[in-house]
Image (cartoon, rainbow, N blue to C red):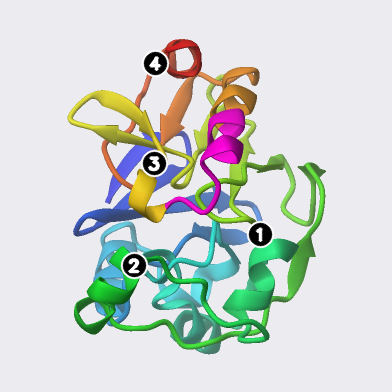
């Protein structure tokens, strides 16, 4: 586990990342990795002298299996509340079928599936919610209900999810084969570029630890 900013830690889970935000009330886990990776999350927490039982809230950026694979088991083990946007909550809880792209259908036998789980807090607008000092930013495109989170620490820490990725130091938008709405995805990049933050972390790729918003502005203008 790597500390990216004060109380914001990265948990690498293969090609995808989860994050932990330490609060006065316990831990906030942002995304939960591929199925069958809970043991890796537990080991990472143990390295930081924490445990799954310390997780109070699980924030989900979107419904894709590589971000929701361990949510059900982690919620059961910790009693944590699950938070997601309304447009993706209906997929996460099983009310709607997963709108899989062709690439997702081909990868499904290898990736596995996420067990459906209730969403305890449904987000429907930008702004504050139950986790203090964290702002939800609806960033549709990758999925209809994709949401990024802005943490008020260290000049601002943006948890971008998959709205933007970092491939070997080069930022990119949502990959075309995994994007529900390319037009919305481009607008979401511009929306994030209009915010104020110093640090950005991604569902896929390494964090940017300084002047991150400038890189987002360059991407939005390209």
Tell me the CA gap for discs 1 and 3. 24 Å
Q: Which of marks 4 and 2 is nearer the N terminus?
A: 2
> Quick one: 28 or 212, which is closer to the camera?
212
Whichever of labels 1 and 4 marks the residue nearer the N terminus, that label is: 1
Q: Is residue 185 rendered magenta in the image?
A: yes
**What residue is disc 2 on?**
102
Q: How crowded is mark 2: few (under 14 residues within 10 Å), some or many (20 or more)?
A: few
Q: Left of 189 or right of it: where is 208? A: left
Percent x, y of residue 72: 50, 85
Q: In this view, does 13 lie above or below 162?
A: below
Question: Label 3 crowding class (10 Å Cα cut-off): few <14, some 14-19, many 20+?
Answer: many
Q: Splitting the image into 4 quarters, where does residue 212 fall?
A: top left
Which residue occupies the extreme front position in the image?
102
Q: Which residue lies at the image location 68% right of the left edge and 86% below the top edge?
A: 95
Q: Is mark 4 on a helix, strand or loop?
A: loop
Say which quadrant the C terminus sits in: top left
Residue 216 on image: x %, y %: 47, 19
Q: Is residue 126 magenta?
A: no
Disc 4/disc 3 C-alpha distance (Å): 14 Å
The residue tagged 4 is 210
Q: Can residue 80 be seen in this view?
A: no
Q: Residue at x 55, y 55 (%)?
A: 143
For marks 1 and 2, give the CA distance. Answer: 41 Å
Front residue of 101 and 60: 101
Q: Picture coordinates of residue 102 (x, y %)?
A: 34, 67
Q: Is residue 12 left or right of residue 57?
A: left
Q: Is residue 127 above or below residue 27?
A: above
Q: Do the residues labelled 4 and 3 touch (CB within 8 Å)?
A: no
């Amino acid at each position: 586990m790597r500390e990216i900013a004060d109380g914001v830690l990265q948990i690498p889970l293969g090609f995808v990342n989860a994050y932990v935000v330490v609060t006065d009330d316990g831990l906030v886990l942002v995304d939960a990795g591929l199925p069958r990776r809970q043991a890796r999350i537990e080991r990472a927490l143990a390295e930081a002298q924490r445990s799954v039982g310390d997780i109070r809230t699980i924030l989900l950026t979107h419904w894709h299996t590589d971000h929701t694979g361990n949510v059900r088991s982690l919620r059961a083990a910790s009693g944590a509340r699950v938070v997601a946007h309304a447009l993706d909550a209906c997929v996460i809880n099983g009310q709607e079928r997963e709108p899989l792209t062709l690439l997702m259908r081909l990868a499904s036998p290898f990736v596995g599936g996420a067990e459906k789980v209730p969403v305890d807090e449904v987000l429907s607008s930008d702004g504050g919610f139950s986790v203090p000092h964290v702002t939800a930013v609806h960033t549709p495109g990758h999925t209809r209900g994709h949401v990024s989170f802005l943490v008020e620490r260290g000049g601002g820490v943006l948890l971008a999810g998959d709205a933007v990725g970092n491939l070997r130091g080069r930022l990119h938008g949502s990959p075309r084969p995994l994007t529900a709405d390319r037009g919305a995805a481009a607008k979401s990049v511009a929306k994030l570029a209009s915010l104020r933050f110093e640090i950005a972390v991604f569902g896929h790729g390494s964090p940017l630890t300084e002047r991150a918003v400038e890189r987002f502005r360059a991407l939005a203008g390209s």
